[in-house]
Image (tube, rainbow, N blue to C red):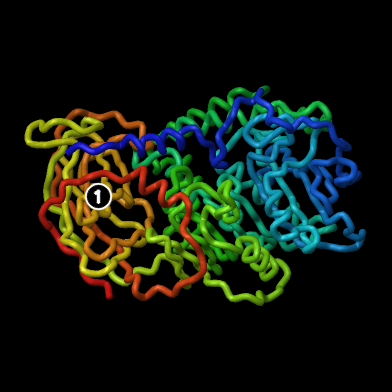
Amino acid sequence: MKRSRTTAGTASALAAVVALTGTLAVPAATAVSGAGTPGRSAVATADDAVTHDENDRVPEGAAWTQHYFPSSDGSDVELHADVLLPEDLGADEQVPVILSAGAYFGHSGELAVEGHAHTGPSGRFGDLVEGIDLFDRGYALVLVDVRGYGGSTGCLDFVGPGEQADVAAAIDWAAEQPWSTGAVGMYGKSYDATTGLVGNNLDQDALKAVVAQEPIWDMYDRVRSNGVPRQEGIIAPGTYNTIATLPQLPDDDERYRENSTYEQRHPECLAANTSNTLIADPGTSYWRDRDLARQAAGSDTPLFVTQGFLEWNTRPEGMAEYLANHEGPQRGWLGPWDHVRGNDRDPDGTLKMGREGWFDEIGAFYDQYLKGIEPTTGYPAFAVQDSTGAWRGQDTWPVVERTARIRLGDGSYVDDGGPSEEQDGARSSYVVWSAPVEQATRVVGAPKVALRAQGTGNVLVELHDVAPDGTAVMFDEQAAVLGPGRLDLDLEQTDWTLAAGHRLAVEIGSIQGGSWIDTPSGQTIRVTDARLELPLDDPADDVPTAGGRATWLDAYVAAYTSELPVGGADFRLPPVG
């Protein structure tokens, strides 16, 4: 069976050079055009606040100070924080705190030196500041560099125990300041959304709410799929080593500049950050310490998340487990988008997720849990867009009405890494077909595949939505290294609707393209007793909510569409209505 992966490969190649911010990295010496315009440049200290009138990098309406405090693990790690308070805050007044902790708050730039003419606080979340009128609304914004980044010392820790201790220290420090009410909310996207999940898992009384856009639910899944390396696992360590060694600005205070050179003075930190991500076994202590979904068991901080089911960067793997383990209030926007924020727009102004009102919902969420102000607008707990582009509201996710348990039988393929001519009765993959579905049927949550395999190599399982003319869209997948015994494989979480008359095709075979760095064995793999566990939902029960089609959906369908020669019906999907 031969199918084109050219367009899909283009998407994977793009993903390989994109850091966790979703921003294309540029060399550290490259200045952003226009960023070097001279301006007001006063530098804040802990005791001397600086306003926008004194430094044009400070948001209007804010007063900027800088602070240093220890991590909570008893080490000598020193953390740096930029604090932005309402400019008119009285000496005896207190406000709740929006905290973000992560790698991207260095004064010279997020991923690269951005050509700023002078120092100042990061503008990474300037959209939040404007979107909810943060300072007029009566909040502080605290940006903390976790160890190894910006003005903080210590070795990079990739969301490990040390970095988790940094998050704990940041929450407590923000809650204990004289200008703080003691109520802390966390906000972030990607890496600093992941530290928000860490904050929830820590179960600290001061943390009252977390907003996490496109986080990583289990750090192992970021770099490997059941033992198969991902391109991101090769790219990410180099990206973060670069961020940690960015030169900071000459007018930064001496303490900040000294702390910012910690990784240059300790190259062993960079080497360890690179080598640790090569650990293949998810059962090691290194990866268990970074399994945030497992660690969420019993946590109860109010949580608002976004997740793109068609993400090429921070994938939805582990989300359902995290949400199931989390026992507190949950909110979310979920849908067929890529690595974007809830408020991101295309150049023509179209919202990338397709739904208006991100900051209205976020502002009401923080007001409710940090100030005790009940929302005046009713929002669904989860606003979910499926593959048709339609939005629905529901109380939880996923909603599974029926789980189909399907025997896929036996088959064989050659683990050659790509389409091949037949060898020993096998090709690079084989396909098992459903009969056409009689009604629209949604696949939701994490499908599971179990099989036995004879032979050494890799396996890739893909689910395709196949139209009557044989046009197929791959909508879910997972790869694994084959080992002795039975393989139980969770596919990525999905929310995809098969239209009436469409068929589900299950493809099992060699890894062909995508974001994996696999080593084909060349062996013929014989599969026996393959089974599929498929969670299903009935779209006829949907309660519509407002929203338009995510802009990434059409691009994804174009990239992942192929032609499959339709085979006979090997199984039927049960009705869900």
* Farthest front residue in view: 348
Determine which quarter of the picture holds residue 148. top right
Is residue 442 shown left or right of residue 389? Answer: left
Is residue 383 shown left or right of residue 58? Answer: left
Position of 434 relative to 379 (above/below): above
Is residue 301 visible in the rendered image? The answer is no
Determine which quarter of the picture holds residue 440. bottom left
Position of 49 relative to 157 (above/below): below
Q: For mark 1, does the 10 Å Cα neighbourhood hold few (<14), some (14 to 19), or many (20 or more) residues?
A: some
Q: Position of residue 188 (x, y in %)?
A: 62, 51
Q: Position of residue 335 (x, y in %)?
A: 45, 58
Q: Position of residue 523 (x, y in %)?
A: 17, 31
Residue at (46%, 35%) from the top-left corner? Answer: 14
Q: Position of residue 473 (x, y in %)?
A: 30, 50
Query: On the image, numbered disc 1 is attached to which residue?
Result: 471
Is residue 535 shown left or right of residue 565? Answer: right
Q: Quadrant of the N terminus?
A: top left
Is residue 193 shown left or right of residue 441? Answer: right
Residue at (67%, 50%) from the top-left corner? Answer: 100
The amino acid type found where label 1 is placed reads Thr
Q: Quadrant of the C terminus?
A: bottom left
- Asked whether 67 or 211 is in front, the reply is 211
Is residue 201 visible in the rendered image? The answer is yes
Position of 139 relative to 516 (above/below): below
Residue at (68%, 51%) from the top-left corner? Answer: 127
